[in-house]
Amino acid sequence: MKSFWSSYRTLPPKTRVYLGLGGITLALAGHFVSDWLENKIPVDSQQTIDSASSSQIIDTSQKTSLQKPINSRISKVMTTSKVPIVYHPGYNIVFWNFEKIHPFDTQKFKRIHRILLTSGLFNVNSFYEPSPPTSVDIANLHSTQYLESLNSNIQIQKILEVPFLAVLPQVLVKKKVLDPMLLQTGGSVLAAELALEYGWGINLGGGFHHAHYDGGGGFCVYADITLMVEKILSKYPDQVSRLMIVDLDAHQVERGDPLGAMDLSAEAILKRDELVFQMALDHGVPIVMVLSGGYQKKNAEIIAESILNLINKFGLLEGRRKSVMNAH
């Protein structure tokens, strides 16, 4: 049997144009319906708050199971102050459902945000919102040649591995793709600064570790980690003299395993993140977490689960980690 694309290429040009226009019409309809539903069900209305529940930390001797609802395994005492978690609705790449062509979940950021809200620990004002880097920051971060190449959709579609971007208006690609990535880049810098204050920080985005001075790739346009390091070293020389980057992203390999053929369970990922935080916090070293990777819809749940596990295990909302940092 011929593949879909093989059959498609044999169609007359006019038929292909009509099919393309029909697909765009359906995508637009899906986009408007999706936006309408989101507006009808605001994020903060999904919270489940139990102010009478105990503030006791979960029993970490019990094995975590993602099959149980997250709310049933954590202490639901809402914090009334901000926490060093960074998020902005503008992180999400919404492109009239065309974003679903790529396996990367471009809206996992809001999914994680919603799960954190439904935990009952936070409200919509609990998180910090970032600003994008300045044009000067970006000019210092990347070569002029690379930045000029981003004015071409051909270059962007190569980085994101989404061919249809090449035929769309550049102004639309900038608004729908580049602007969200710039905002996430600013979020990584803010999360690092918050880590110096609180002892820890998390950006619900960023981690574009394939981007470098002269280029990008693997769905990474801007080198947010590099900018984060440069900003921290230049702005806080009396507090920070060196940094360590721990890259825990697992990539697809020949077998096509989304977790890099390492047979990682969700529980193993939670334990992995826990070990890294444990080492940093035990030594009084500020730690910042950025998301990176995540090519499956269920990744949002796993990431949110890991964040909630870290908060409960290390008492991150209790303020003691901030005092530990001040003591060093």
Image: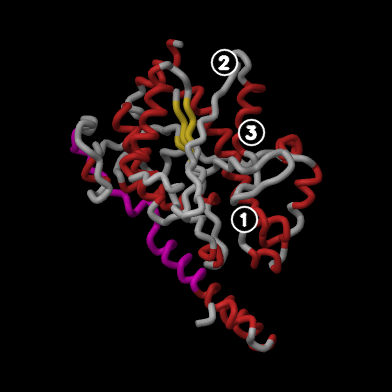
Frontmost residue, 290 versus 48: 290
Frontmost residue, 125 versus 231: 231
Q: Does dot 1 land on a helix, a strand or a loop?
A: helix
Residue 309 found in image quarter: top left
Instruction: Give the amino acid at mark 2.
Output: Gln
Is residue 242 placed above or below 48 in the rendered structure?
Answer: above
Between marks 3 and 2, how big is the CA–CA gap? 18 Å
In the picture provided, is 19 more to the left or to the right than 254? Answer: right
Q: In the drawing, what numbered circle is on residue 239?
A: 2
Is residue 291 placed above or below 42 in the rendered structure?
Answer: above
In x, y percent, where is residue 96? 55, 67
Asked if the stretch drawn in magenta spans residue 49, the answer is yes
| Residue located beneath label 3 in the image | 226
Q: Are marks 3 and 1 in contact (CB under 8 Å)?
A: no
Local crowd at mark 1 within 10 Å, few (<14), some, or many (≥20)?
A: some
Q: Is residue 79 visible?
A: no
